Amino acid sequence: MAPAVVQMVAESAAKDYKKESATARLLGSGTAGIAELAIFHPVDTTAKRLMSNQGKVTSISRLNEVVFKDKAHAPALRKFTSLFPGLGYAAGYKVLQRIYKYGGQPFARDYLALHHGTTFDSMFGPGNGKAIMHATAGSIIGIGEIILLPLDVLKIKRQTNPEAFRSRGFFRIVADEGMGLYRGAGWTAARNAPGSFALFGGSAAAKQYLYKLEDYNKASWGQNFVASIAGAAASLLVSAPLDVVKTRIQNRNFEVKESGFSIVGRMAREEGFTSFFKGLTPKLLMTGPKLVFSFWLAQTLIPAFGQVV
């Protein structure tokens, strides 16, 4: 007897609604953010310092100076601890960012599914529509991420330009700089929109087309891992040029008012086109795993917590 053929019907985007509780989303995304911070903060510092370097790194000794700054010739332990500047700002920013992005995207997805799910289905088809809806929800959340920009600015300055603080504390800096802490907000939104679209879209595409999953929450930890690699790689490649510009805007002394377009022009003239991809290799090799790890953990834990809370 010939085996029965089971026809897979793609789930409608309009039905992709309220898969887990708000508590599960908070716990899963928060745990992912804390775990990522504990493991990868030194990696983030290294990547930011390489992106902020405006010269060419032509030797190991120069690389040592760029990464470890004034601790370049210190003992190994002092060098390692120098990669943990701004940990307080990093903790606040990274955990809130992951809760907002990984925990917030499902709420944006719910809204789109409830109010526009049939539109996504009619425009792209049931399977395609659901994947693109996940990506669009990610892009919306990515743009809104600029609300956390002041913490990101302070974290980056601590990592790359600690002299900008001049012994001032957090509240003193907020009082002195005010809305200046939102400098680069436009460039950040321009980076986050396609970056987050690619992150959630790449993951959704892997689950939709590679694993043929009707319910993305049913993905195994291994499937989530592969989907996270797809999303993270797409996100880093798409957002790399704008990320370099954003980092240079944010790492300067507070009184410097150079615009993003001015930085783009100077980079093109003085450093060439490849300068827009500075730090991409360490980001793919080091920051890439960090994003894969946290995204994989969030995608795995949110449905898991959804089974118990």
Image (tube, rainbow, N blue to C red):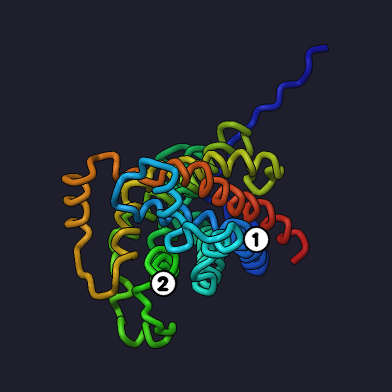
**Other residues around mark 2 within 10 Å, as few (<14) / some (14–19) / many (≥20):** many
Q: Is residue 7 left or right of residue 48?
A: right
Question: How far from the left and from the top, in percent, is residue 18?
Answer: 61, 59
Sooner in the amino-acid sequence: mark 2 or mark 1? 1
Res. 41 visible in picture: no
In terms of depth relative to the viewer, which is nearer, 192 or 3?
192
Residue beneath the point at 36% across and 41% down: 58
Residue beneath the point at 54% across and 51% down: 291
Residue type of the residue flagged with mark 2: Leu
Question: How far from the left and from the top, in percent, is residue 147?
Answer: 40, 71
Residue beneath the point at 34% across and 53% down: 53
Q: Would you identify the image quadrant in which residue 156 lies?
A: bottom left
Q: Is residue 300 left or right of residue 37?
A: right
Residue type of the residue flagged with mark 1: Ala
Question: How far from the left and from the top, in percent, is residue 293?
Answer: 61, 50
Residue beneath the point at 47% across and 37% down: 125
In the figure, 225 relative to 42: above or below?
above
Question: What is the CA distance from the residue labelled 2 to the residue labelled 1?
Answer: 21 Å
Tag shown at residue 173: none
Tag shown at residue 35: 1
Tag shown at residue 154: 2
In the figure, 151 relative to 57: above or below?
below
Q: Secondary structure at mark 1?
A: helix
Q: Secondary structure at mark 2?
A: helix
In terms of depth relative to the viewer, which is nearer, 98 or 215?
98
In the figure, 57 relative to 210: above or below?
below
